[in-house]
Image (cartoon, grey):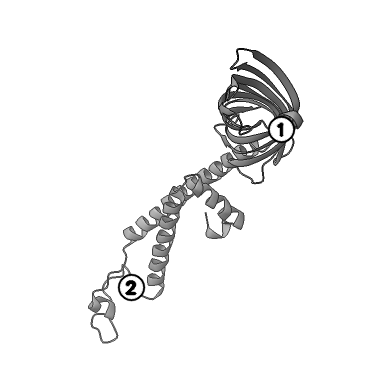
Amino acid sequence: MGFEAMSLDGWGCARRGLFAGDWALVVVTVMLIAGIAAADSTEDSADSGFPIAQGEAHDESGGPSSVEASGAQVPSPATQAELEEAVRKAEEAADEAWAAARAADQRARDAERKHEQSGPYLGAAFAYAAEDFDDSIIVKSSVAGAAFLGYRFRRWFSADLRYEGFDSFDLKSSLGRGEIDGYAITINGKIRPFDGPIQPVIGIGLGGIRLDADFDFNNGTQRDSSQSEFVFRMSGGIDLPVNDHLMVNFEAAYLIPDDDLSDLEIGVLSAGLTYVF
């Protein structure tokens, strides 16, 4: 394999192969260059007029030649054959490393295309919901869960339908104690601004939220109420692929209800899994 066969595209493939772990290409290339340089040096010595295997060399005066007098060593045919064999083996190893680099590059391209292609996906997440309610009440944070179904339309854009459930925000105020349960259903558009298998995700969504409150007043009376309103959802996170179909998701989101529930804003931290079809 000659150096003239290495195109610019080939060198780019080799560089990508190195990042995939094919360091053998560097070692083999150095061996190839060293072998060719040694062979060229031997040929130059032969062309310079040094007598090889022709008996003793003498100068015009009949005495020993300058080569013989100086004690210079001329490569023997056996040494030349060994150099040629070393070069041949280096070329074979270089061909194998080149093929391995191309295979690694192709695998990386296939994996990247898999995680950038369009198609449906579904997932679930475990979450921690922190309240940002009105300051007049004290609330303990809630455990939450989520499930979602979506579709990736382009490499950089997807949309999903998401359900988030909140379990028992514990309330405490000067009037009594209670708890709030609820859920939100939103449609979210998500943008992935950067290429690659590890992608940050920015999302904006709109939907509805329902909260059910049970409150026990200090005077012994009870009050149950339910309220539904529109909700605006903002989110940011990152997707990490595990294999061709499974991805791990980390997300932080903030839900802002409208009108009568505007004082009951909720922050959500979640970790989940997504299955890509």
Q: Is residue 198 left or right of residue 227?
A: left
- Please name which of the two marks, 2 or 1, marks the residue nearer to the observer: 1
Instruction: Please name the amino acid that badge 2 sits on.
Output: Pro
Which residue is the extreme one toward the front? 219
Q: Earlier in the sequence, mark 2 or mark 1?
A: 2
Disc 2 on helix, strand or loop?
A: loop
Where is residue 105? Give x, y as percent. Answer: 56, 44
- In terms of image quadrants, where is residue 42? bottom left
Observer-nearest residue: 49 or 252? Answer: 252
Where is residue 205? Give x, y as percent. Answer: 72, 34
Where is residue 197? Give x, y as percent. Answer: 59, 40
Q: Is residue 51 left or right of residue 236?
A: left
Residue sitting at x 41%, y 73%: 47
**Residue under numbered circle 1:** 262
**Residue under numbered circle 2:** 51
User: Which quarter of the rendered picture does the C terminus lie within?
Assistant: top right
Q: Is residue 103 left or right of residue 83?
A: right
Q: Is residue 168 above or below residue 7?
A: above
Which residue is the extreme one toward the bottom? 61
Asked if the residues shown at circle 2 and circle 1 are in contact, with their CB atoms under 8 angstroms apart, the answer is no
Observer-nearest residue: 42 or 200? Answer: 200
